[in-house]
Image (spheres, helix red, strand yellow):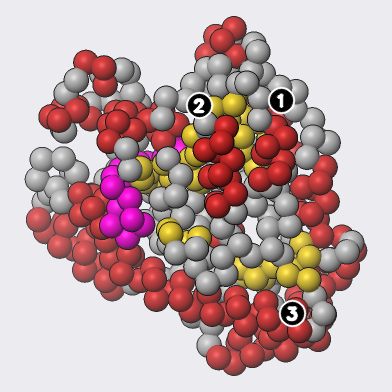
């Protein structure tokens, strides 16, 4: 969360005074946000969900991913990406990240099998994946693409908004994201059929509220990940803040990256530095020891930074439910145990993406902030130069 204040309070006050606090019937805040978010990212449809996890899960349901399918996910992402695959009944296949800290297209190609149905590129810490190469692979191998843009809300890749490049895209609006309503999420897609199926997965009675979805084929048992008007109201206020904030952070990232490179550091690979979120500048070192020494020097000068390796359940070795193959609350529902997945199942081991572990422990990420004053940015620049 970067900013929240009076605009949100005003919107919530009006909502309470109106008494229309349920999204269907007389509500309007969620409808408004879905319309504006779809327009903002350049997608035909947007559906709010409960959070980012349910947005990924409902995208997969919308696309018809399920038992018997493998879905490729990167070794560096919050474990919810892989858990959403399991929730849909499919098997997550973990692939390496490269020096962009995002999904390696080369490793994706290596891990495709006859069972692969979809790829989930994750735009981690605001960094866009190489969507041009990944979409080329997906087209060639007839795979579906669900972008996990949970950490890259509002970012872009070569002029297109993240989340709106693949067949579906998912966003999180939880407290830690670029815009937030505390907890929240949404998926987008250009395909009406995906939107309709995904909407039923978001709301088990979706067809009741949306009469155009009142079709037998859509009346499968869904869950309930319905969004609230309070979330819609806050997000409508947050959306007006998004682009000006990202513009500032992109500029800061470009300056921090340029300063580091000029001082002899190696930048991580940035696939679209003009369009991305700009939330983190990243540097790669020859060894973990050097990376930790650089971070310690930054910390001494009160400049915050972190190694992606240290971020707990964002590294596959820490995804316990996956590594231990505990895919559901009941064995008969567990994708790791059901007969339909016998051929799609893989073995998980801490060594399976050793190259990712190496890269993630040699990288240092330096967060930007839209409220950093000029003197703070100057201090960060000087500290990076000195530590380099
Ligand atoms: C990359 C990524 N995917 C998915 C999620 C899940 O989002 P949520 O916490 O809103 O369910 C997160 C949230 O932290 C995330 O960072």
Q: Is residue 65 left or right of residue 299?
A: left
Q: Residue drawn 56% across and 57% down? A: 128
Mark 1 to mark 2 CA distance (whole Å)? 15 Å
Q: Is residue 129 left or right of residue 258?
A: left
The percent position of residue 127, horizontal first and vertical second, equals 58, 60
Mark 3 to mark 1 CA distance (whole Å)? 40 Å
Q: Which residues are magenta?
A: 38-57
Please report whichever mark, 3 or 1, sits nearer to the chain's N-terminal start. 3
Q: Residue drawn 38% across and 68% down? A: 242
The percent position of residue 261, horizontal first and vertical second, equals 75, 79
Decide if ligand 1 comes within 8 Å of the CB at mark 1: no
Q: Is residue 336 above or below residue 30?
A: above
Q: Quadrant of residue 69?
A: top right
Depth check: give the residue in front, 147 or 363: 147
Residue mark closest to the camera, 2 vs 3: 3
- Tell me the number on the disc at residue 87: 2
Q: Give the class, few, some or many, for how many residues have Cα within 10 Å of label 3's Cα (few <14, many ≥20).
A: many
Mark 2 to mark 3 CA distance (whole Å)? 42 Å
Asked if the magenta segment contains residue 56, the reply would be yes
Residue of label 1: 324
Please report whichever mark, 1 or 2, sits nearer to the chain's N-terminal start. 2
Considering the numbered disc 2 on the image, is that residue within a helix, a strand or a loop?
Answer: helix
- Tell me the number on the disc at residue 260: 3
Q: Give the class, few, some or many, for how many residues have Cα within 10 Å of label 1's Cα (few <14, many ≥20).
A: few
The percent position of residue 360, horizontal first and vertical second, equals 76, 54
Q: Please say whether residue 368 is visible from this viewpoint.
A: yes
Q: Residue drawn 60% across and 49% down? A: 133
Q: Is residue 240 above or below residue 338?
A: below
Q: Residue drawn 75% across and 23% down? A: 347
Q: Give the class, few, some or many, for how many residues have Cα within 10 Å of label 2's Cα (few <14, many ≥20).
A: many
Q: Quadrant of residue 352?
A: top right
The percent position of residue 318, horizontal first and vertical second, equals 71, 40
């Amino acid at each position: 969360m970067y900013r929240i204040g009076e605009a949100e309070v005003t919107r919530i006050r009006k909502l309470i005074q109106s008494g229309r606090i349920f999204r269907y019937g007389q509500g309007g805040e969620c409808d408004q946000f879905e319309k504006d978010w779809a327009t903002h990212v350049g997608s035909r449809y947007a559906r709010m969900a409960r959070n980012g996890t349910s947005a990924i899960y409902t995208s997969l349901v919308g696309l018809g991913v399920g038992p018997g399918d493998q879905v490729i996910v990167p070794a560096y992402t919050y474990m919810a990406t892989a858990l959403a695959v399991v929730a849909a009944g499919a098997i997550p296949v973990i692939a390496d990240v490269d020096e962009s800290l995002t999904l390696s297209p080369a490793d994706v190609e290596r891990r495709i099998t006859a069972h692969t149905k979809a790829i989930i590129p994750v735009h981690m810490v605001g960094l866009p994946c190489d969507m041009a190469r990944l979409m080329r692979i997906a087209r060639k191998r007839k795979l579906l693409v669900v972008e996990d843009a949970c950490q890259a809300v509002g970012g872009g890749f070569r002029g297109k908004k993240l989340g709106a490049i693949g067949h579906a895209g998912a966003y999180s609006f939880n407290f830690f994201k670029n815009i937030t309503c505390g907890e929240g999420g949404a998926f987008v897609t250009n395909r009406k059929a995906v939107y309709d199926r995904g909407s039923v997965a978001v709301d088990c009675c979706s067809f009741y509220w949306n009469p155009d979805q009142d079709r037998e084929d859509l009346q499968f048992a869904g869950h309930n990940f319905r969004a609230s008007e309070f979330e819609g109201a806050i997000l409508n206020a947050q959306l007006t803040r998004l682009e000006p904030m990202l513009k500032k952070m992109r500029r800061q990232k470009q300056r921090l990256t340029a300063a580091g490179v000029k001082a002899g550091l190696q930048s991580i690979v940035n696939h679209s530095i003009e369009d991305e979120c700009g939330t983190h500048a990243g540097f790669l070192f020859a060894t973990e020891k050097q990376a930790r020494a650089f971070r310690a020097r930054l910390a001494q000068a009160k400049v915050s930074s972190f190694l992606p390796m240290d971020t707990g359940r964002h590294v596959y070795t820490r995804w316990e439910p996956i590594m231990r193959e505990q895919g559901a609350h009941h064995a008969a529902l567990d994708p790791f145990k059901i007969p339909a997945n016998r051929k799609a199942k893989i073995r998980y081991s801490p060594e399976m993406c050793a190259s990712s572990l190496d890269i993630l422990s040699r990288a240092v990420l330096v967060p930007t902030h839209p409220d950093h004053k000029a003197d703070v940015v100057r201090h960060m620049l000087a500290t990076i130069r000195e530590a380099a």
